[in-house]
Amino acid sequence: MADQKKNPQNKLNIELPEEVAEGVYSNLAIISHSNSEFILDFVRLVPNVPKAKVKSRVILTPQHAKRMLKALQENIQKFEAQFGAIDESGQPPFPPMSFNTPKAQA
């Protein structure tokens, strides 16, 4: 950080377009990899619908994937220090397809 103040050329200007700033809701992530990349597919499961679409895909190098893992671990630790432990009890390893809601009727 101090280096950025001394040398303004090290400063990175990141633009966040409005359509990206809205974000994409996902309740399932599918992670796959090859020898040269990690692919993160973010999916939205909808109650009582047996088909789901990938809403966003992020492709990372193995090095960036590892840095992302570390950053996510650090942020979860900070979150839990501020708000308490994230409760994972009773959570199945894969989200259920029905969410225990009644079927929609028209």
Image (cartoon, rainbow, N blue to C red):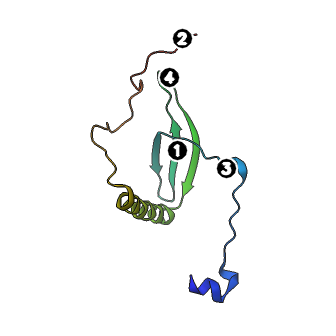
Query: How far apart, in angstroms, are the residues tagged by discs 1 and 4?
Result: 19 Å
Mark 2 or 4, closer to the camera: 2
Residue at point 46%, 43% (across, down): 30
Mark 3 or 1, closer to the camera: 3
Residue at point 51%, 26% (across, down): 51
Horizontal side of 69 relative to 88 (left or right) equals: right
Q: Which residue is mark 2?
A: 105
Instruction: Label 1: state its secondary structure.
Output: strand
Query: How far apart, in angstroms, are the residues tagged by discs 3 and 4?
Result: 26 Å
Give the image location of residue 3, x and y in percent. 59, 86
Crowd tier of the residue under label 4, counting other residues whose Cα lies within 10 Å: few below 14, some 14–19, many 20 or above: few
Q: Quadrant of the N terminus?
A: bottom right
Query: How far apart, in angstroms, are the residues tagged by discs 3 and 2?
Result: 33 Å
Disc 3 vs disc 1: Cβ atoms closer than 8 Å?
no
Crowd tier of the residue under label 2, counting other residues whose Cα lies within 10 Å: few below 14, some 14–19, many 20 or above: few
Give the image location of residue 19, x and y in percent. 70, 47
Q: As drawn, which residue projects farthest toward the left?
A: 89
Query: What amino acid type should be assigned to the residue bearing mark 1?
Result: Asp
